[in-house]
Amino acid sequence: MRGEQILDALEQVDEELLYEAQGFRGQRRKKSRWPLVSLAACLCLVVAGTMVAQLWRSPMESNGSVGKESHNQMETELEHGSGGVYVPPLEANEGGNMVTEADVASFFTYQGRSYVACSRIPDGSHLVGKKLGTSDGHVDEWTLESGYMEDSARGDFYAVNGYDPTHLLCMQDEEGSVTLYWNNNDITVKTGSDVLETVFHLPGQVVEAAVQGQSMAGGRDIPHLDRLHAWLEELCNTPAVSAEEANLTSKDVYGDLILKKADGVTVHLVLYDGGYVQIEGLDPVCWQLDWTPVVQGKA
């Protein structure tokens, strides 16, 4: 209602009612418009103030809602590993055959992290560090809430000299061979550096490299390690891609690129057509970076 309409409406009100409402008694004064104008002005201010407050509150509430939604979305993205590829914890179907799963990949749990076998190094005693625990090799406990499990790997496990035990541990057999176990699950991989550098300290440290495949009997050595090192540096900076989104299972495998460090630690990269690269044992993750200049000697 506009101010003029309010004023007209007030002038239609019986003066008796106005006087009684304001507590006036006694002799009536002449009819005056000024009290009514003042009252109408006050009412107009109230109405206008209400409208302004409503207009002010609406965008604020809207912006606040958007801000809250954005904050919640950010929290959700962080929880689900947005900005990278999240690799979930090891899983077993409730009531399923966990021994079968243990046979597929030897693993054990230490401080809430599951470590999976990734490579075996003959005469790797120099890598064995401080003893951290013992796994009895029995798959006898599974808690869906915590993801805790006792598993298939049997024996003492140790830190690996020169590597972070958060990422890499090892076991040694009676013959002196050392099996490396890495924490390849319940992690978010953003770039190649999160694995190649953080876990294996690979860039600039490769002393031997070979490519193996079905069409290559015995494999073939990579002669140009300087070119390989440059490619690995680029791979470390390449964003991770979900193997599912890349439809990696539909692509042909060219071969495996075997990278060996001076301490004997080896890393296997799987090469797919289309320039895709995957680290063996990290199935949900891949990278797209042309590998042909390295393995085929192309410029």
Image (cartoon, grey):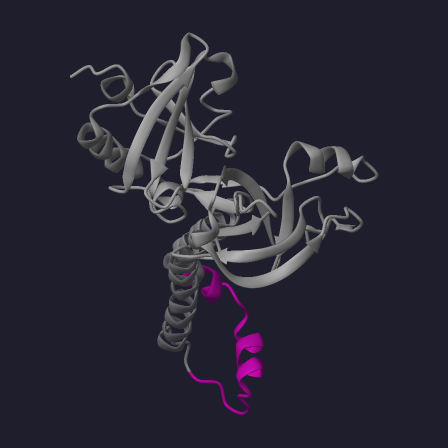
Question: Which image quadrant is residue 294 in?
Answer: top left
Question: Which image quadrant is residue 228 in?
Answer: top left
Q: Which residues are magenta?
A: 7-29
* Left or right relative to 243: residue 239: left
Question: For the point 57% across and 49% down, which residue is it?
Answer: 172
Q: Nearer the viewer, residue 64 or 97?
A: 97
| Residue 134 visible in rendering | yes
- Is residue 42 depicted above or below 217 in this figure? below
- Is residue 211 depicted above or below 242 in this figure? above
Q: Residue furthest bottom?
A: 26
* Residue 10 magenta-highlighted: yes
Q: Position of residue 249 (x, y in %)?
A: 52, 17
| Residue 190 visible in rendering | no
Q: Position of residue 107 (x, y in %)?
A: 63, 44
Question: Which image quadrant is residue 34 in?
Answer: bottom left
- Is residue 292 depicted above or below 140 in this figure? above
Question: For the point 53% across and 50% down, which residue is it?
Answer: 170
Question: For the point 40% across and 58% down, which residue is it?
Answer: 60
Quadrant the N terminus occupies: bottom left
Q: Residue furthest top?
A: 215
Q: How many marks?
A: 0
* Residue 32 magenta-highlighted: no
* Left or right relative to 284: residue 35: left
Q: Residue furthest left?
A: 299
Quadrant the C terminus occupies: top left
Q: Residue furthest right?
A: 95
Q: Position of residue 116 (x, y in %)?
A: 58, 42
Q: Position of residue 48 (x, y in %)?
A: 38, 62
